[in-house]
Image (cartoon, rainbow, N blue to C red):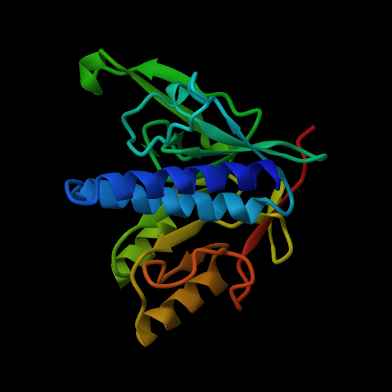
Amino acid sequence: MATADRWISSVERKIKAFAERHAFVFQHTARQVSASFEIGCFHALSEFYVNNFSVIPANLTEEGEYRYLTSPTGNPKNFSYLKLESALENFELRQQIRIRSHLHSDIAFTPDLVILRASAELESARDRDYAAGKRSLYFVDSSNVVAAHECKSLNPFPELLVGFIGMLIVAHDWLGKPNAITSSLTGPHLAPTLFVGGSARALHLRMIAALEMTYPINVVVGLHSGTWSLLGSGRSLNRLLVVPSM
């Protein structure tokens, strides 16, 4: 069994055991449901990369456990992430990393999941307008972003779908440029993707298809009731090809 498969199986066993022990007292708040959905998307994305990369858990706790980051206020250096290694170039799959946009240094946001070049520098700075300057802001520059993904545990609606285009523009320096990252149906990277829990109606499905034809994105809906696999789903997903940096 591959390292990634063993790790995922171990996490699944621990989640199942916890749920069985606390079935009568454990209550799901909206925040917990959102975090659980994000972790599910995280694992779906990690499984997508298994065929083309070695998926290696990094920055584990002293007990060897994986520590998820599901809040934008956490220090990423204190949480685990996945190394995506190949013979050509290495990348990282991280949660809740603030991206500083190439459009303007004051334009920044924190997507749920992000694929970064392994060479990306995690910067920190104090800002008097954030926590009165008492805590550091951690961020990466958008020039290091391959793909930013968002997870929404709700039903799809037009404003949500259109809003994701704003994230695409703000976070991806390569968009519309003839540079090292291009759209490709056979590339090893998943294009920026909006993961949605609820199922879409026919009118929304038409809008999703139009957006995917217009932009290098994916909108994956119905995760609450459908498969979490991004492979062999019966429809092609937009992908990215990344030319190795020199």
User: Is residue 176 among the parts visible in the rendering?
Assistant: no
Q: Is residue 93 above or below residue 28?
A: above
The residue furthest front is 21
Quarter placement of the C terminus: top right
Residue extending farthest bottom: 202
In the displayed structure, would residue 196 be above or below residue 77?
Answer: below
What count of labels does the image hold?
0
10, 182: nearer the viewer: 10
In the picture shown, does residue 166 fall above or below 209? above
**Which residue is drawn at the image coordinates 29% and 64% (left, top)?**
154
Q: Position of residue 164 (x, y in %)?
A: 40, 58
Q: Is residue 182 left or right of residue 229?
A: right
Q: Residue at x 46, y 54 (%)?
A: 41
Name the foreground residue: 192 vs 69: 69
Q: Position of residue 58 (x, y in %)?
A: 58, 29
Q: Is residue 116 left or right of residue 185?
A: left
Quadrant of the image occupied by residue 245: top right
Q: Residue at x 48, y 23 (%)?
A: 61
- The answer to whether residue 64 is above or below residue 193 is above
